[in-house]
Image: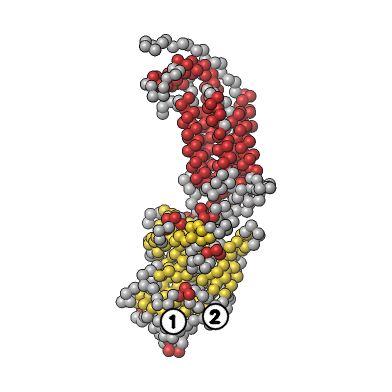
Amino acid sequence: MNKDMTMEKRLLLFFVLMVGVLAISQYFNPAPAPANKTGAAKSEQAKPEQAKSEAKPDQSQNGSASGQSNTAAAKPGESAANVKASSAKSAEISGQVQGEKEETTTVDTDVFRVVFSNKGAVARNWLVKKFKDRDGKPLELMNEKALGKVSAPFAIAFKGTSPSTDPNNALFKLDRSADGNELVFQYSDGRTLTKKSFRFQKDSYLVAITSEVTQNGVLLPHSLTWRGGFGDATVINPTAVQHALYYDQAAQKLQVKQAKDAKDGPISATGQFSFAGLEDSYFAAVFLPGTKPSIEHTTYSDNIPNEKGADEQRVGAGVGGDGSNSLSLFVGPKDTDLMAKINPKLTQVIDWGWFWFLAEPLFRVLNWTADNVVHNYGWAIVLITVVINLLLFPLRISSMKSSKKMQSLQPQIKAINERYANIPMRDPRQSEKNAEIMELYKKNDVNPVGGCLPMVVQLPFLWAFYKVLSVAIEMRGASWLWATDLSQPDTVFGIHWLPVVLVITQFITQKMTPSPGMDPAQQKMMLFMPLMFGYMFYFASSGLVLYWLTGNVVGIGLQWVLNKLTPTPAPVTVIPAPKKKGR
């Protein structure tokens, strides 16, 4: 078994194999034709000769890349006259500003513990306190194995002209606010001035970030990057669920990029984006542009060692594009209620998939059931699965009746097959045989694929449950009986027991379900189906396995009732067909 195969690929493989099995079955039984701008830059501490040109410490100087014009963005409360006055002057950089030695600084809020280094003014750790890793410690969202391989989060990537001194290797001077929640980093070599600020809130996942780079008073366009991977490293195959993304307002579409998309080099897009950044299954780090008309998003791919020491492609992103960037950054769980309160646009981060019209309502019902009825997400899955199967019960009855009718027609079908025995597959007389069987089905009002309908109808619900368990942060760490995390496979003594029980119930279900007209070779082929289910579900999340397993258990009970209460119709009398000339 390839445990690194994603669930999407497993489901796709399962669908293909199932369709193949059904198609082969139909050879024997042919079917009838049918923002909030909170991150203003804190003032740099100017030298005496700079005091006059920098009298307004919160001004943000802007200009074109050619240096032909410079403007100033006003912060709330500044007058238009002040903005106009400040735009008349470009920044004059004189002297040097830098840190004395390399050191780290920790910002501790109710939701974060973030460690910054003044070398490059970058983050070295980003922990979310309310979510734990396997060891019960605050979850680290940075890929620490990437440090030293690629630039750390919030390093600067330049677009076009780069300064003579790389600020990512410079020692910045740090000014920290009295409450400890705002950090302002500055570095200047006398020609190039680089400033970054980070403003945290006590109990919010939103951070206000600004960055500005000028060389000889001219703004240098740049982006802030987060490379080498992002998110929860405790999930299975984390590289498969980590993406760069942005929401294109013009196209009204969420654009998702993988590491392999940038394997030949970084790829960029510029537009009016609601947000842009990175995500994994349950967490996101996305920038919101506020009132900026457009921003640039760049996707990176870097080879980073995994836990086994082998290099693998990890996705990264850069966001910005201007010489002076003022953005809000959300780093936190993909919790719909939480994100809606911070900024309704953030809820677009959650991709409910193809069957969104089932997945999103299913999540709402599941969440309500767990909160108000059973107080456990595992039992909520069980209860909702029972309800779904009861709603599909009329379809199961119809399927059962169709199977019983098929069973009564088997003598007729056998007689037709015998008349056309030993005829090659490409012989035109095969179409005559099929026509006779089709006429028999039509005359007796039988749909030969009716027995497959209950399973086919459940497949959209299976995909919807998969998406809910893949993106709903509420599932992460939710327990049920021996399963400690419904978003992960259940493991006891190194074995995933829920998939094992599922395979057993699948065999029982298949044994109890009528299979009229199926010859021994076909029956052996169908015995492979439960093993297909076992392969597909063995490394799946325990919540998804619990859904299908519960459906099997309910189905076994309903099938037993139907087998007892639904009599098999009397066999249809075989009327020999007249032989045609030349046969």
Give the side of residue 299 with respect to residue 564, left or right: left
The N terminus sits in image quarter: top right
Give residue 86's position: percent from left, percent from top.
38, 80
Q: N-terminal of the two: label 2 or label 1?
A: 2
The residue lying at 57 percent from left, 43 percent from top is 537
- Tell me the tag on residue 189: 1
SS for dot 2: loop
Estimate how packed mark 2 is, as few (under 14), some (14 to 19) or many (20 or more) residues with alpha carbons within 10 Å.
few
Q: Mark 2 points at which residue?
A: 101
Q: What residue type is labelled 1?
A: Asp
260 in relation to 413, above or below: below
Rendered image quadrant of residue 134 = bottom right
Give the side of residue 150 with respect to residue 387, left or right: left
SS for dot 1: loop
In the image, 267 versus 177, the foreground residue is: 267
Give residue 253's position: percent from left, percent from top.
41, 53
Give residue 7's position: percent from left, percent from top.
53, 46
- Tell me the tag on residue 324: none
Q: What residue type is labelled 2?
A: Lys
